[in-house]
Image (spheres, rainbow, N blue to C red):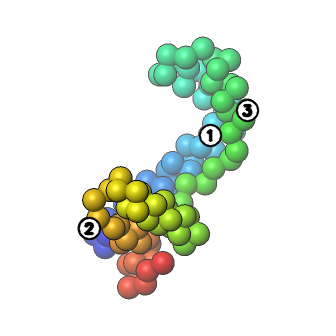
Amino acid sequence: MQKKNGAFIQGVLATFSEADALTRSQREQSIALLAKTMGLPAPVIASYLDHRPPTTIKPVNAEVAALQQQTADLFYENRLVPKKVDIRQRIWQPTQLEGKQL
């Protein structure tokens, strides 16, 4: 799946980043659209956008993967999941297309 859909996944990530940038460059239109689609008052949406840092949507990096692995290990140790999970095997990375992993 990773090799077959890598370009598509990267396109989706880029589109999400572009959409996030539009909430800043076209603030009023974004507030109106989000208020309408989410059924929330415009001031609530405006407050949310005002307190949210700019976001670039990108693949999970090694640091985040390590933090997620710690959480997965903690869940296993506390019997919240039935078996150990190797997070690196579950995360798509564009470098995996070149045969590399985190």
Residue lying furthest right: 50
Residue bearing mark 2: 1
Give me the disc on residue 60.
Answer: none
Cα–Cα gap, marks 3 and 1: 14 Å
Q: Tell me what residue is drawn at x 68 percent, y 39 percent.
A: 52
Which tag, 2 or 3, sits closer to the chain's start? 2
Of marks 3 and 1, the one in the foreground? 3
Image spot of residue 80 (x, y percent): 35, 53
Residue type beneath disc 3:
Asp
Q: How crowded is mark 2: few (under 14 residues within 10 Å), some or many (20 or more)?
A: few
Image spot of residue 78 (x, y percent): 40, 57
Which tag, 2 or 1, sits closer to the chain's start? 2
Q: What element carries label 2?
A: loop
Give me the disc on residue 22.
Answer: 1
Image spot of residue 93 (x, y percent): 44, 70
Residue type beneath disc 2:
Met
Image spot of residue 12 (x, y percent): 43, 54
Q: Tell me what residue is drawn at x 43 percent, y 80 percent.
A: 101
The number of discs equals 3
Given residues 71 and 93, the one toward you in this image is 71
